[in-house]
C-alpha cells in the first residue's frame, strides 16, 4: 500500500484525541448496561473550527495544487461544514474559494453559523434555491450554477478545481483511510479492542474511507454509519465505488462490495438538516455529561443511534465502542430556535 507516498498537504492538527466518555457511560446505566465508549475527536482537527472534512482536504488540496489549480469550487447545503472548511483550506494555501450552496427554502438565509464563517474566510458565496431533501445538494439548479462559476473563474484567469460534494471522491476517501491508521495505532496503545465504530454518514466519503481503512489496517471493529439523509441505494453504490477507486490509488487489491457497508436509516427524521427530538436529547446528554458539543445535522443523529442501541440492549456492556465525532458545532448557531423547540429542558 502506498498511502505514505500519496500527495498530501498538512492542514489539520493531527492526531486528534481519543478519550473515554466515562460520565456518559454512567448516565446510561454504567458497566452493567452500557459498553465502554471512546470518543475519537475529529471535531478538534482545527482548520476554522474543525471537522471530518479537514482530513479529506489534505489529500484533495495536494491534488489540486499538483494540477496547478488556483481556485477551489465546491457545493453543499447552506450550512455546509465542508464548504466552510474548503474555504479555510483555500485561505491557508493562498487559493480562492467559490461555494455554491443550496438553500432549502425560498428565503435568503441569515449570515450565521457556517455561512458567516464562509464570508469571513473570503469565499465567493453563490446561493441556489432548491430542494436539499435528498443529499444536501440541489441537483440541476446547482449543476448549472457550478458550470457558471467555473466559467467565470476561468474568464478571470483562474484555474479552478472542483471538489466533490462533501469531499467524497476517491482522493478524499484517503483522509479516512489515514484516520484509520491513526485510530488503530491509538487503540493499540490504549489496549482497547472495540466491537463497533459509530459515525454520522452523509455523502459517504468518511464511511468509504473507514471501511477500506478497517480492512487495510486490520481493525477489530465494524463500521456502523448512521445515515443523516435519504437516498440510501444510490449512496451505498457511490460509497463502494469511491472506496474501490481509492483502493486502486493505493495499489491494494482490497475491494468493497456495496452490501458490506452497514448504514442505519432509522435516525434521519424528516430529512437532511432537520433536527430530531432524539438528536437534541443526545446533544443535551453529551453536553451535560462530557462537556462536548454535538451538532444537530450530523453528530446528534449518530449519537441518537448509539443511545438507542445502548438502551434497547443490543450492545454488549462488556464491549467497547468508538464514537467518531466528525465536528459540525458551528452549525448549531444557525439552528438555535429549532434546537430549543425540541429541547425538553
Ligand atoms: C460532512 C459531515 C459528516 C458526514 O461525512 P460524509 O463523508 O459526508 O459522509 C459528518 N459529520 C459532519 C459534522 C460533517 O460535516
Image (tube, helix red, strand yellow):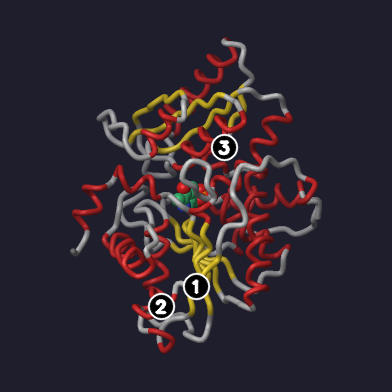
Q: Can you tell which mark lies on residue 164?
A: 3
Residue 9 in picture, x, y percent from top left: 68, 40
Residue contact between numbered discs 1 and 2, judged by CB atoms under 8 Å: yes
The image shows residue 116, relative to residue 18, as above or below, that is above
- Residue 25's tag is 2
For the question of whether residue 233 can be seen, the reply is: no
What secondary structure is found at the residue carrying circle 2? helix
Mark 1 or 3: in front is 1
Secondary structure under badge 3?
Answer: loop
Residue sitting nearer the eye, 312 or 197: 197
The residue carrying mark 1 is 20
Give the spatial CA distance, label 1 vs label 3. 34 Å
Residue 169 percent location from the top left of the image: 62, 42
Label 1 or label 2, whichever lies nearer to me, is 1
When the figure is inspected, residue 13 is found, relative to residue 215, above or below; the finding is: above
| Mark closer to the chain start, 1 or 2 | 1
Q: In this rendering, would 320 be left or right of 308? A: right
Q: Is residue 280 left or right of residue 235?
A: left
Q: Earlier in the sequence, mark 1 or mark 3?
A: 1
Amino acid at each position: 500500500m502506498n498511502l505514505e507516498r500519496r500527495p498530501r498537504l498538512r492542514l489539520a492538527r493531527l492526531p486528534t484525541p481519543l478519550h473515554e466518555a466515562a460520565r456518559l457511560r454512567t448516565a446510561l446505566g454504567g458497566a452493567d448496561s452500557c459498553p465502554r465508549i471512546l470518543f475519537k475527536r475529529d471535531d478538534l482537527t482545527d482548520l476554522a473550527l474543525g471537522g471530518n472534512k479537514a482530513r479529506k482536504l489534505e489529500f484533495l488540496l495536494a491534488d489540486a495544487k499538483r494540477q496547478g489549480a488556483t481556485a477551489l469550487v465546491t457545493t453543499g447545503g447552506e450550512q455546509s461544514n465542508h464548504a466552510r472548511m474548503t474555504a479555510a483550506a483555500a485561505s491557508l494555501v493562498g487559493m480562492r474559494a467559490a461555494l455554491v450552496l443550496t438553500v432549502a427554502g425560498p428565503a435568503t438565509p441569515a449570515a450565521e453559523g457556517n455561512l458567516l464563517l464562509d464570508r469571513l474566510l473570503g469565499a465567493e458565496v453563490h446561493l441556489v434555491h432548491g430542494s436539499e431533501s435528498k443529499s444536501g445538494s440541489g441537483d440541476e439548479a446547482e449543476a448549472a450554477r457550478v458550470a457558471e462559476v467555473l466559467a467565470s473563474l476561468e474568464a478571470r484567469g483562474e484555474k479552478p478545481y472542483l471538489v466533490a460534494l462533501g469531499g467524497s471522491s476517491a482522493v478524499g476517501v484517503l483522509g479516512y483511510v489515514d484516520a484509520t491508521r491513526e485510530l488503530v495505532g491509538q487503540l493499540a496503545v490504549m489496549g482497547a479492542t472495540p466491537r463497533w465504530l459509530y459515525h454520522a454518514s452523509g455523502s459517504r466519503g468518511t464511511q468509504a474511507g473507514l471501511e477500506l481503512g478497517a480492512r487495510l489496517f486490520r481493525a477489530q471493529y465494524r463500521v456502523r454509519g448512521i445515515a443523516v439523509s435519504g437516498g440510501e441505494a444510490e449512496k451505498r453504490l457511490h460509497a463502494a465505488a469511491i472506496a474501490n477507486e481509492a483502493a486502486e490509488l493505493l495499489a491494494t487489491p482490497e475491494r468493497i462490495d456495496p452490501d458490506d457497508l452497514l448504514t442505519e436509516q432509522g435516525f434521519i427524521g424528516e430529512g437532511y438538516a432537520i433536527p430530531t427530538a432524539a438528536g437534541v436529547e443526545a446533544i443535551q446528554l453529551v453536553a451535560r455529561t462530557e462537556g462536548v458539543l454535538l451538532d444537530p445535522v450530523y453528530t446528534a443523529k449518530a449519537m441518537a443511534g448509539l443511545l438507542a442501541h445502548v438502551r434497547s440492549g443490543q450492545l454488549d456492556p462488556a464491549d467497547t465502542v468508538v464514537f467518531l465525532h466528525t465536528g459540525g458545532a458551528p452549525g448549531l448557531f444557525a439552528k438555535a430556535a429549532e434546537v430549543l423547540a425540541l429541547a425538553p429542558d
